[in-house]
Image (cartoon, rainbow, N blue to C red):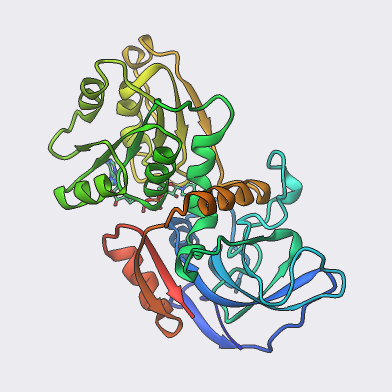
Amino acid sequence: MRTYRLAKPGSGDLVELETADRPAPGRTQLLVRTRAAALNRRDLFITSGRYPLPARPGVVPLSDGAGEVVAVGADVARFAVGDRVTASYWPRWISGPLRPEVVDQLGCTVDGWLAEYVLLEETAAVAVPEHLTWAEAAALPCAGLTAWNALTRPGTLVPGATVLTLGTGDVSLFAVQLAKQMGCRVIATTSSAAKAERLRALGADDVVDYLAHPEWSGEVRRLTGGAGADLVVETRGPATFGQSLRAAATYAQICLLWVVSEPPEVLTVTESDLRGSLATIRREFVGNRTELEALCRAVAVSELRPVVDRTFGFDDAVRAYGSYRDQDSFGKVVIEF
Ligand SMILES: NC(=O)c1ccc[n+]([C@@H]2O[C@H](COP(=O)([O-])OP(=O)(O)OC[C@H]3O[C@@H](n4cnc5c(N)ncnc54)[C@H](OP(=O)(O)O)[C@@H]3O)[C@@H](O)[C@H]2O)c1
């Protein structure tokens, strides 16, 4: 089978294609024929050496993918040949809180999806909703689950609450779609009229152009009659945090999601920003397998369709990385097999 691996540091390449033997599943494993794999910002941080978790040299990249089970080990009980599956970003984190002993990430410390066949422990696998294409199914594990956990922690939202999303990155688009399905009002920010239209089509009730309104937090307050947003899905970083706080309702939650922020890297909060706020600030790091199953149930029931911007063939994986890095997108960049 053909597989990509993380390129050797200094080689000038992002990923390198190799031929390898097709693996056989161990007793508790699934052999999956990959049908699609999706890129996330973290995959660029990994190739550029900026990701906080050091990648294993030569690891098969990409945390997100979906495929068809083609063989199962003797002790596999939850899946059968022919099933359509994806897998948890953290393959050993099944439920409960993240603990040091389950810290492994697909496409970083252990092999991910950018190979024609992948071996998965059955405990890491999750059935994908039937209505999804392979590309849509591959979109769920990282950005989809991160948005899900930002929105669904107990005590976060009730129908009618206002959710603020920043820009049109993958997490934000999922947050817009999921928040609408939860009966919330969504205010989204973006930088162009064309993207504003697409955000409205996805379900955003109001869109604020953050270039036309550099003090966009004031617009969010105006749109909410001065009350502010009940949840801010903070995907940008220190550069936007002050305004996120100013756009937030008194008892809001602000879910800080960035892992590697663009400069400035120091988070500064002014006393005046804090004075009127009793907000709770929390973090998420994607989520566990049980939460991915919950997301898949919600996606199946609501027939949500993840947004896919563009697809590349397996042979064009290097081009897909370059395109994702260098070009603007609205939705996932996916490699189809
Ligand atoms: N904690 C976790 O579990 C987790 C999981 C996934 C991702 N992340 C992190 O979350 C962040 C977002 O990732 P992503 O893949 O969803 O999106 P992304 O690709 O990093 O976002 C790109 C978008 O950001 C928007 N943007 C740029 N500057 C902005 C500004 N000043 N205000 C508002 N929006 C701005 C732009 O939207 P417009 O073009 O619409 O202007 C752009 O299209 C990254 O740091 C990523 O590493 C964390």
Give the answer, above or below, for where 301 lies relative to 71.
above
Residue for point 36% across, 77% down: 319
Residue 64 vs 214, above or below: the answer is below
Residue 110 image position (x, y, % from top left):
66, 65
Q: Identify the residue at image location x=45%, y=77%.
A: 336
Q: Report the number of numbered marks.
A: 0
In this rendered view, identify the residue nearer to me: 275 or 89.
89
**Nearer to us in this view, 261 or 286:** 286
The location of residue 292, given as percent across then percent down, is 61, 51
* Residue 250 position in % (x across, y down): 39, 14
Q: Tell me: residue 198, above or below residue 1.
A: above
Left or right of 216, for residue 138: right
Q: Quadrant of residue 279?
A: top left
Q: Is residue 101 left or right of 284 when viewed as pictured?
A: right
Q: Nearer the viewer, residue 67 or 190?
A: 67
The residue furthest left is: 212
User: Residue, x 86% and y 75% (percent of image)?
Assistant: 74
Res 115 quadrant in image: bottom right
Residue 230 rendering spot, x and y as whole percentages: 40, 24
Q: Quadrant of the N terminus?
A: bottom right
Q: Is residue 17 above or below residue 85?
A: below
Q: Residue at x 85, y 73 (%)?
A: 27
